Image: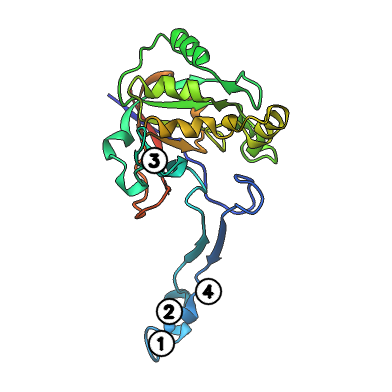
């Protein structure tokens, strides 16, 4: 049996629009020459000429939000409570068994940008792929945002999961989901337009807020989901262990046994 590992994470990098203005990561690269003064301070008397090829080490300084790059959101990100009033768990408290489970992929690339997925859409997709959900399966959503990544309109691309669509999954035992879009919800620009028309605050972040009813996690800014089958793969997405945090970065991968 052959094993294929598909990288479903994006890069952390400068100069690619993966977040709204003012929320992007910042990476400073310190190469083998720039680091020499830092290295020689550890060893009195050491000169650059004493080093192999006159080189020090390569290091990077990074300014990040826990929500930059491919990351796993904890229930604490969505609200201070989960499961109908219990304290919401932070990323260091997320059960690790949630993060290594069989995966199911929904192909929602045909929905227009800003569309809010309903429970009926989820049922129709499960019928199309011939799958019955099992508890703890990881559901990943392939949207139009996947193909838009790297372009100026990425943040405003893709459909989003509505409250009833998210609850449909959670009520069937799903505890970890994911999307290749910037947010599990529809892009904020579309939600803002709908809010101006309705003045209904319940539509803002409605998919996230499902965690107040049933605690769950989701991955954001996945990639390469179009290369996955509908099912028959395993997702591994263990988050960084950041005490008390709302999210943690992850090198999410899909494992396909062939």
Is residue 14 or residue 91 the one in the foreground? 91
**Distance between the alpha carbons at the discs numbered 3 and 1:** 56 Å
Where is 129 relative to 66, above or below? Answer: above
Q: Residue at x 35, y 16 (%)?
A: 133
CA separation in Å, label 2 and label 3: 47 Å
Taking the image as shown, residue 95 lies to the left or right of residue 105, namely: left
- CA separation, marks 1 and 4? 15 Å
SS state under label 4: loop
Question: Which residue was labeled with disc 1?
Answer: 46
User: Which class describes the residues within 10 Å of circle 4: few (<14), some (14-19), or many (20+)?
Assistant: some
Give whichever of discs 3 and 4 has the lower sequence position.
4
The answer to which image quadrant residue 200 occupies is top right
Q: Is residue 19 left or right of residue 208?
A: right
Are dots 2 and 1 in contact, CB under 8 Å?
yes
- Nearest to N terminus: mark 2 or mark 3: 2
Residue 117: x %, y % from top left: 55, 21
Return the residue at label 3. 81
Q: CA distance from mark 3 to mark 4?
A: 49 Å
Is residue 235 in view? Answer: yes
10 Å crowding of disc 2: few (<14), some (14-19), many (20+): some
Q: Quadrant of the N terminus?
A: top left
Residues at badges 1 and 4 in contact (C-beta under 8 Å)?
no
Q: Residue 74, can we see it?
A: no
Disc 4: which residue = 33
Q: Residue at x 66, y 26 (%)?
A: 113
Q: According to the image, label 2 marks what residue?
A: 39
Q: Dot 1 lies on which element?
A: loop
Where is 160 relative to 241, above or below?
above
């Amino acid at each position: 049996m052959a094993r294929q590992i598909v990288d479903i994470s994006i890069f952390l990098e400068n100069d690619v629009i993966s977040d709204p203005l003012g929320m992007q990561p910042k990476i400073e690269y310190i190469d083998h020459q720039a680091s020499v003064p830092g290295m020689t301070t550890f060893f009195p008397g050491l000169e650059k000429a004493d080093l192999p090829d006159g080189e020090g080490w390569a290091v990077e300084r990074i300014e990040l939000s826990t929500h930059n790059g491919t990351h796993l959101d904890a229930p604490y990100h969505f609200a201070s409570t989960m499961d109908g009033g219990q304290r919401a768990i932070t990323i260091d408290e997320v059960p690790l068994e949630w993060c290594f489970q069989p995966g199911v992929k929904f192909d929602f690339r045909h929905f227009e940008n800003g569309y809010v997925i309903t429970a009926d859409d989820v049922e129709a997709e499960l019928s199309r792929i011939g799958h019955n959900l099992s508890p703890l399966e990881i559901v990943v959503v392939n949207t139009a945002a996947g193909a838009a990544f790297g372009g100026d309109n990425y943040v405003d691309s893709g459909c989003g999961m509505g409250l009833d669509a998210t609850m449909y999954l959670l009520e069937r035992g799903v505890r970890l989901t994911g999307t290749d879009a910037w947010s599990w919800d529809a892009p904020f620009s579309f939600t803002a337009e709908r809010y101006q028309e309705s003045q209904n605050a319940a539509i803002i972040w409605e998919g996230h807020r499902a965690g107040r009813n049933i605690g769950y996690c989701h991955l954001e800014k996945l990639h390469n989901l179009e290369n996955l089958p509908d099912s028959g793969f395993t997702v591994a997405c263990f988050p960084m262990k950041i005490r008390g945090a709302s999210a943690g970065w992850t090198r999410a991968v899909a494992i396909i046994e062939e």
